[in-house]
Image (spheres, rainbow, N blue to C red):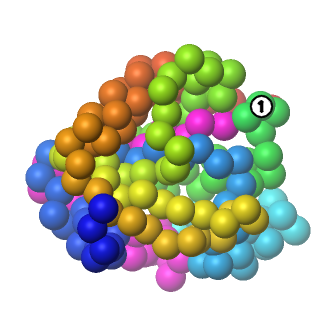
Amino acid sequence: MSQKVPSFAELLDGAQQTACHLEMHDAYGVDSEADDFARWKATGQRDIDPGSPYWGPWVDLIRRTVTRGVVVRRVRIVSEPVSDYIRYEHAGTPVNLGAGEQVRWLPRRRASDVALPGNDFWLIDARLIRWNHFTGNGASAGGEMSDDPATAKLCADAFEVVWERAVPHENYTIN
């Protein structure tokens, strides 16, 4: 494992073909989302303005990544019935899609027989992994990088199985 963890901009700017993101938590407690999540819980209104201060930097990053021909895919493995946080994520996903990400949802019960890594990750060009670590309450605990070929293969294989089983966002209904 290498010590230098690039920013997401550096990571995605370095991608040449693919950027795959696997999320496996039912709730996150990331500081940058706290206000928006609290507002959504109180009002049911989610910021879905791609140019807003909340979304703008991410939308710009994804757009410039996909414009270079990089395919950006995200799968969220979720428990059902879904948590409030997953409802919140689902409500904001049209912004991800509009920026050029492909997003799918996999009910956790359909992932029981998949060998999954222990942490969320970004996999760049099927060779470089950025592990996303979280505390027990969902706060970010930093990232970690790996370019170990066997671990990259584990992540790539797991992602492809999950991707094939997952439901495209436009077909995934939250009850």
Residue occupying image coordinates x 41% and y 22%:
161
Q: Position of residue 82 (x, y in %)?
A: 77, 39
Q: Which residues are magenta?
A: 50-78
Residue occupying image coordinates x 75% and y 65%:
137
Residue 72 seen in this snapshot: no
Q: Quadrant of the C terminus?
A: top right
Q: Quadrant of the N terminus?
A: bottom left
| Residue 8, quarter of picture | bottom left
Number of numbered discs: 1
- Asked whether 54 falls inside the magenta stretch, the response is yes
Q: Nearer the viewer, residue 53 or 117?
A: 117
Q: Position of residue 107 (x, y in %)?
A: 65, 27
Residue assigned mark 1: 80
Residue occupying image coordinates x 33% and y 28%:
157
- Asked whether 77 falls inside the magenta stretch, the response is yes
Residue occupying image coordinates x 28% and y 76%:
4
Left or right of 1, for residue 168? right
Is 141 located above or below residue 93 in the figure?
A: below
| Residue 68, quarter of picture | bottom left
Is 142 located above or below residue 78 in the figure?
A: below
